[in-house]
Amino acid sequence: MSVEIRRVQSRKERKQFIRFAWKVYRSDSELNRQWVPPVIADYMKTLDKEKYPLYDHADLAMFTAWKDGRMAGTIAAIENRRHNEMHRDKVGFWGFFECVNDQEVANALFDAAAQWLKAKGLDAMRGPVSPSMNDQCGMLVKGFDSPPVFLMLYNPPYYNNLVVNAGHHVGQELLAWYINQDMIDIERLRKIGEYMKKREGLTIRTIDMKDFDNEVEKIHDIYNKAWERNWGFVPMTDREFDFMAKGMKPVAREHFIYFVEDRDGRPIGFSLSLPDMNVALKHVNGNPFTPWGLVKFWWYGRNIRAYRTIVMGVLPEYRSKGVDSMLNAHIADYGGRHGLYSSEMSWVLKSNEAMSKLAKVIGGVPYKEYAIYEKGI
């Protein structure tokens, strides 16, 4: 076989694994124009089995493919025991897939991941999931003409063919919805929000950044309860959630994290949005923490005019009561008054009709689509 597969073992090899993406995207002018390099330090943590909390209940193997003496692709295989316990299945995951346009190389990578997962007693593989559904997932299949927003993925169009030709089929489809100040009917949203506040006795407030840890606990509680019936969802452990919260705190903004509370002051819903930091990250080549990287990050960060609504959670007993309209009205209102022209709601399951209806109501259009593939092993 002309393709050699190597197991990643050392820290040096892990960094080499991450850096391979530059070979794929820098070799094509259009890909390079849209692609935002990942923050290398963040990926190093995510792939560190000793530090990343996911691996308290999961395992990971990373592989590189080599052809003609050169690295030609990467893939990670993930066993998430907590997922399989909750969903009562034997699914393994694959992610961090990057590959030259060569089916032989792609097949070798998927075979390596499948063999590792099968040895774990699993009978199916699903991806890309990098490395969990609470992280980055989905392969872009529509919307290649614009860059990804913060914490969303981008990939070459040919990746879909490599995956399908390796025997995988689409298991789920995800949407990213685009909204801007010209599309949204802010007055209508305000009226709906005010009406629901009065009818249900609800109030809305921003996060208290001075009491960040306690506020995060409230988000964690609502998140796990609100999402428990969603496809592929696995409740985050305290350690996972705390780790995520600490990572997001430096870029969190008070007026992009809202709570809705009932008459007794109990939080019953929340919305988390973040500025589109990719506008600045695009220019730091994966290294925002160097002196020159910090200068560039600050300079280009001044041009951020968009944000991403990452997650919105409402307790089951308060769904269909306008809580989401209250949240969206406040987010859009603040954005419009502070020069934030557009936003992305992502990701949303294509099968989630309620969320798609909400996105349409506030003027959104689906402009990017992602696929999560499955295959028996």
Image (cartoon, rainbow, N blue to C red):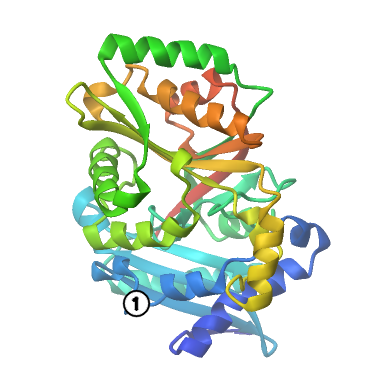
Image position, residue 314 (x, y; %):
31, 31
Q: Quadrant of residue 370?
A: top right
Foreground residue among 248 and 107: 248
Q: Quadrant of residue 46?
A: bottom left
Question: Residue at point 31% right, 11% down?
Answer: 198
Q: Amino acid at mark 1?
A: Lys
Q: In the displayed structure, would residue 74 be above or below residue 36?
A: below
Camera sees residue 45: yes
Compared with residue 329, is residue 19 higher up or lower down, i.e. above or below?
A: below
Q: Nearer the viewer, residue 247 or 230?
A: 247
238 left or right, relative to 292: left
Q: Is residue 283 left or right of residue 202?
A: right
Residue lying furthest front in this view?
Answer: 210
Q: Vertical placement of 236 versus 104: above or below?
A: above
Residue beneath disc 1: 49
Q: Relative to 245, is 26 on the left or the right?
A: right
Q: Residue at x 51, y 74 (%)?
A: 41
Q: x%, y% of residue 337?
A: 61, 30
Quadrant, the C terminus: bottom left
In the depicted structure, whether residue 87 falls above or below residue 196: below
Q: Residue furthest right?
A: 29
Tell me residue 346's x, y (percent). 51, 41
Q: Report which quarter residue 239 is drawn in.
A: bottom left
> Element under label 1?
loop
Q: Quadrant of the N terminus?
A: bottom right
For the point 33% across and 63% down, which residue is it?
A: 243
Residue 36 in sight from this viewpoint: no
Which residue is found at the position 27% from the left and 58% from the top?
90
